[in-house]
Amino acid sequence: MQRVYLDNAATTQVLPEVVEAMLPYYTTCYGNPSGFHSFSREAHKGLDAARRTVASCLNAADPSEITFTGGGSEGDNMILRGAAKANRKKGKHIITTAIEHHAILHTLAAMEAEGVAEVTYLPVDAYGRVTPEQVKAAIRPDTVLVSVMFANNEVGTIEPIAEIGAVCREAGVLFHTDAVQAVGHVPVDVQAMHIDLLTLTAHKFHGPKGAGAIYVRKGVRLPALIQGGAQENKRRAGTENIPGIVGLARALEIQTERLAKNAEKMTALREKLIRGIFERIPDVTLNGHRTERLPNNVNFCLRYIESESVLLWLDLNGIAASSGSACTSGSLDPSHVLLAMGISHEAANGSLRLTLSELTTEAEIDYVLETLPPIVQRLRDMSPIYPKGA
Amino acid sequence: MIYSEKVLDHFQNPRNVGEIPDADGVGTVGNAKCGDIMQMFIKVGDGEVIEDVKFKTFGCGAAIATSSMATELIKGKRIEEALALTNEAVVEALEGLPPVKIHCSVLAEEAVKAAVEDYRKKQAQQNG
């Protein structure tokens, strides 16, 4: 059976050239970079080069602004808790949005429960966008951090990050962006966009799992979350995952190089998929912004049916898709992102997310467009809420 | 999410899908907000035997499979027997359900009971 992978927002295939870059750090240059001998020096060299590459891809002013982590959730936790701790004399007010990833929302909820944060959750419009004006109006004298995701993981909407960054910089408030879905997919420039803190993770751009990084602008205080040794400038204890870090840097280098070309290719396929679904299936709505959208994201609500049964049928036909975030699929509640965009519970229960990568082909999109409509019709025919004769 | 072969079979080839236009009892349970709606139609013949049963379901794979299995388990049975159907019996017949999907089997049991209740109500109206 043909297999089609359209769940690239959940994770991506590690490119062979990335694996190739990683392998020597498992088998040859396997030293602990904190040691004193030649094995350590080799590993340290790889670590330094990776740091320079990541800094350059984000246009950071200095490689020391990059700290490697174990992934996106760790980065988000570290930044939220660290920024709150370092600035507690100023206050504990944090501004974020209603559509963040759970790595942000659940961490902030825990911090509120512990009494170390007071959080304002900004609402979003029907397309999932917040405005710089909303952020500006929410800033108070005791605001210590603004955290707005670069691009949404479910609906792909891109937020006005540079404008929000400018508002925060002017107000003298730290600005963090969870850029896990954006890095390697759309241009990210930490200096031009006035970003103080940023989270990224390798496996969203064809790098390995378990390797991430944060950007911390020089001069911003951020205490360690994980304590122990003096690794990562004392910001993150623990022996560095050198193969993972080298893979992260190589993957980011490749994706930065191919960014414009990949974006063009994926946008064309995305548009074909969106148009095709609109043409072939009645009673569907596109979720997210029509143009301010990640090149690889398609998200629809299929009315009168429930997501999981669609996903099961697609899976039986070899197509890997999701209903929203992989991190919420263990829960039975509809997506908090769709609900925040004002979509009804019933419609939100029928969401379908298809996320492309540079490896997606036009033939695969054709296969999806051929496979999906009869699945939807079959499920609608057995749905008690499907209007007869519609 | 890993479903048993039996669940996947009933999901892909659901038994007794549809409506009975002149049903003797119709039960609808669940709501779109929680993500599952089951509708069950029964046709009752002599000796209170369920001669025909059909269902329509909005929901996940488990919701469709449990509805389908419930209709199989009550078809040709007497009303009293249908009322005795438990969600555990549906789960067992499907060779198990993931823990987060057990509520679907409860909904299937409730759909059967709601259809029978509707049948009883209609009987009472006719006789009264």
Image (cartoon, coloured by chain):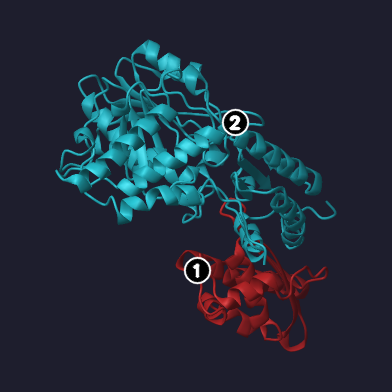
Residue at 48% over, 23% down: A161
Nearest the camera: A53 or B38? A53
Residue sitting farthest toward the top = A170
Which residue is identified by label 1? B102
Res A1 seen here: yes
Furthest toward the bottom, the residue is B47
- Please give the count of numbered marks on the rendered protein: 2
Q: Assign a secondary structure to mark 2.
A: helix
Image point (65%, 74%), residue name: B10
How far across and how far down the image is residue A59, in percent? 42, 24
Q: Is residue B118 depicted above or below B33 in this figure?
A: below
Q: Along the horizontal axis of the image, is A230 left or right of B7?
A: left
* Residue A151 place in picture, x, y as percent: 51, 33
Q: Chain of mark 1?
A: B
Spatial separation of the CA atoms under disc 1 and disc 2: 48 Å
What is the secondary structure assignment of the residue under circle 1?
A: helix
Identify the residue at the far front of this view.
A38
- Quadrant (top left/top right/bottom left/bottom right) for the N terminus of chain A: bottom right
Q: Colour of chain B?
A: red
> Can the viewer see residue A181 in this picture?
no
The chain coloured cyan is A
A269 in relation to A132, above or below? below
Left or right of A35? Residue A356 is right
Question: Mark 1: few, some, or many residues within 10 Å (few <14, many ≥20)?
Answer: some
Q: Residue at x 63, y 61 (%)?
A: A3
Between A116 and A29, the residue placed more toward the observer is A29
Residue type at mark 2: give it: Ala
Which of the two residues, A46 or A51, is positioned nearer the viewer here?
A46
Of the numbered discs in the image, which one, if any, rests on residue A260? 2
Q: Is residue A318 above or below residue A57?
A: below
Q: Amino acid at mark 1?
A: Ile
